[in-house]
Each structure stands twice: as structure tokens, then as C-alpha cells.
Image (tube, rainbow, N blue to C red):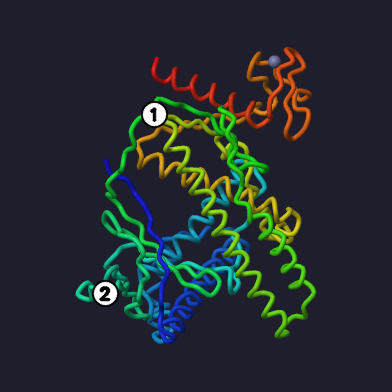
Amino acid sequence: MAVRRSFKFLLRPTRRQEIALMACLDDHRQLYNGALEHRRTAYHKAGVSVRYGDQSGELKYIRAGDEGGQGRWSFSSQQATLRRLDRAFAAFFARVKAGRAPGFPRFRGRGRFDTVTWPKDGDGCRWDSQPERASATFVRLQGIGHVRVHRHRTVKGRVKTVSVKREGVRWFVIVSCEDVPAEPLPATGAVTGVDVGIASLVTTSQGEHVANPRHLAASADHLAAAQRAVARAMRGSRRRGKVVARVGALHAKARRQRLDGVHKAALALVRAYDVIVHEDLRITNMTRSAAGTLDAPGRNVAAKSSLNRSILDAGWGMFLTILSHKAESAGRKLIAVDPANTSRTCARCGHCAQANRVSQAVFACTACGHTAHADVNAAANILRAGLALREAAEAA
Ligand SMILES: [Zn+2]
């Protein structure tokens, strides 16, 4: 069996290449914003929806009219940028249709557009572009050159797409591969339900708690302080530039810590269990999208939600994504269940009432007297729902 997998490496661009990387990112950002403006205007003034095909068709004229600018970069990476905008619109209209408060696709300011993707290796980019140089790995990017890669592990499978991402002052390359050989783990005969939450990233129905990384809360506090400093600093001042850079660095640090914790938790679960049941988070809408309307695209939403919470929130989606990749590669089964009532139903007698949930941490059934850690009780319900689903599927 083969799976898809991504590998992420630090880039070591020369000074000249770094300047080109910044220009490449900024031109793609402006292309994105220009295409967004085009769609907004057409929609507002004429009620017309502009499609990806229309915008992609314009690309060759944009490139021909701007040889030293947009014309420098890969046609395909520019198409990928337009497709990204198209996906943002598709998601927006899907939310409108579902009757949810949609966030209208937003213009991306400097520092709010960090990724360029080349959708096909060999088309405007080439992974391992200098294989004859045994001592180092390079990726060739159109308009930028052969950029050195700190390749700290082997890339397996067939390289499909190549992306470059800026994180603070560092640059990374992400290669997404197909046909990566799966590495199945031996069966353990054990099954578990998992509850994801704030206090613990993961709680299992067996009563194991995996905490969020110890340093994450501290990073969140520092980040909040740095953001207050940005708010105080005068626009355009040198001090403001400094604190903005600090916010970026702290964000990147929190992201690394979260990713690290999430990887460890997911790995521990797939090692120990053959079947892992979790809540389907798409149903709960736990991750709040930045809401907005057509006329007032998402302002001040980020300011409202607590930063600490938002950092942990983002971890759940990331955790489930990574868990599903690891489970697939290891030959483990994941089952997603409807999260309704899992936190207020008694895992022993099935009595469902809000009053059962005494506090964030304590569950005490008002019918049978069963008491448990609230997250463990929820995880037990999640496991039961998952096993019922599996039984129903096997019976069908
Ligand atoms: Zn009970």
C-alpha cells in the first residue's frame, strides 16, 4: 500500500536568492489581490461571478505586459495562486449556502501571504536539481535559481508538488509526494476513543491525558504581550517594525511547539491502538473561521477571540490531520463520530443531561451517580459511538 506524504526542509538561499524569493512571493500576492479585486468588482457592479478559467485566460496578457515583473515567474505557480483564490471563493459560497456566517475572501497584506506552490515537479521548478553534487541538495525555482536545501531526511515516493513558505525570517520548501510506501505497524488488539480539548490536547477512553506542550501557554502569553506592544507603537516607527517582527517570530515558535506536541500525541496513539475513534470536528464548528460579510470582510474578529484559545483551537484540526496521515501509513483505522452530547451523556447508564457536567473537569451523573473526569467520560462515549458505527457498517 502507498500513501501521500509531505516533507518540509529549511532552505538556505543566498542573499541574492532571498531577494528574488521575496519578489516572487510579493508578485504572487499582488496577483492574488488583483484577481480578488477583479472578482469583487464584477460581483458588486454587475452581479457577475468571475471564474478561475476567465482569470487563468488573462494570465498570458498580464505576463506579456510585465516581463520584468509577473513575467519572470512560472505560469503554473501563478495558476496555482489563482486556483487558491478560487478555492477561497468556493468555500465562501459553500458557507453562504449552508446559512453560516461566511468570511469573505480577504486581501492579503505583506506578511499575510507566505506560500507559493509549483503544482508539478519539473514545471517551473525541479526538486533535487543538481543530483551530481552529492554533498548537498538543491531545488531549482524559476526566476530564483538553484536554492540549497537543508535536507535532514530522505524524501520517499514520487515528488508531485513543490511549495516555498516563508516563516518569519526563514524560508522552507515543502515537497508533497505520492506513492510513498506505507509502513504498517503490528496489530495491538486495542481500541480507543479520544476527546480533544483545552486542558489536555487528547484524553483517551482509557484515561490517558496528553497535555498540550508545556511551553505553548508561555508562548501564547509572550505573543499576547508582543501584540499589545504593536498596538501601542506608532505607525511607521522603527520600534513598530521591531515588535511586528517579534510577533512573527513568536507565532512561528508557537506553531513549531504545537506541531511538535501534535506529532508526538498522534504517534503515541497509532503505536498503541488499532482503531482510534474521534469526534468529527467539521460538525462541531470548533475552529471558528474569521467571520465577515461581503461589505465588511472580517475585521476585528481575531481581536475578539482569546489568543490562547485560538492557538489551542488550531491544534485540534492539525492534530486530526496528522493523526489521519500517520494512521493511514501505519495501517490503523480512524472512525469519526457525531460529537453531539458526548460531553453530557453518562458513559455508564446513558443518562443525558446538562447537569451531569458539574464543571470543565468533573462529570457526575444525576441518575446513577457515576463520576469521572469529564474528558474521560466523553472519550468513552466517543469510543462507544465509533464501535456502534463500525458494527453497523460490518452488518450492512
Ligand atoms: Zn449514569
Q: Residue at x 63, y 41 (%)?
A: 200
Q: Quadrant of residue 195?
A: top right
- Residue 373: assigned label: none
State the residue in front, 42 or 336.
Answer: 336
**Amino acid under label 1?**
Thr
Q: Which residue is mark 1?
A: 188
Residue 25: x, y in percent? 48, 74
Residue 109: x, y in percent? 60, 72
The answer to whether 101 appears left or right of 395 in the picture is right
Position of residue 207 relative to residue 119, above or below, is above
Q: CA distance from mark 1 to mark 2?
A: 41 Å
Q: Residue at x 50, y 30 (%)?
A: 277
The answer to whether 350 appears left or right of 326 in the picture is right
**Amino acid under label 2?**
Ser
Q: Residue at x 31, y 63 (%)?
A: 120
- Residue 135: assigned label: 2
Which badge, 1 or 2, is on the more N-terminal residue? 2
Report helix, strand or loop for mark 1: loop
Q: Quadrant of the N terminus?
A: top left
- Ligand 1 lies in quarter: top right
Q: Quadrant of the C terminus?
A: top left
State the residue in front, 62 or 318.
Answer: 318
The answer to whether 377 appears left or right of 353 in the picture is left
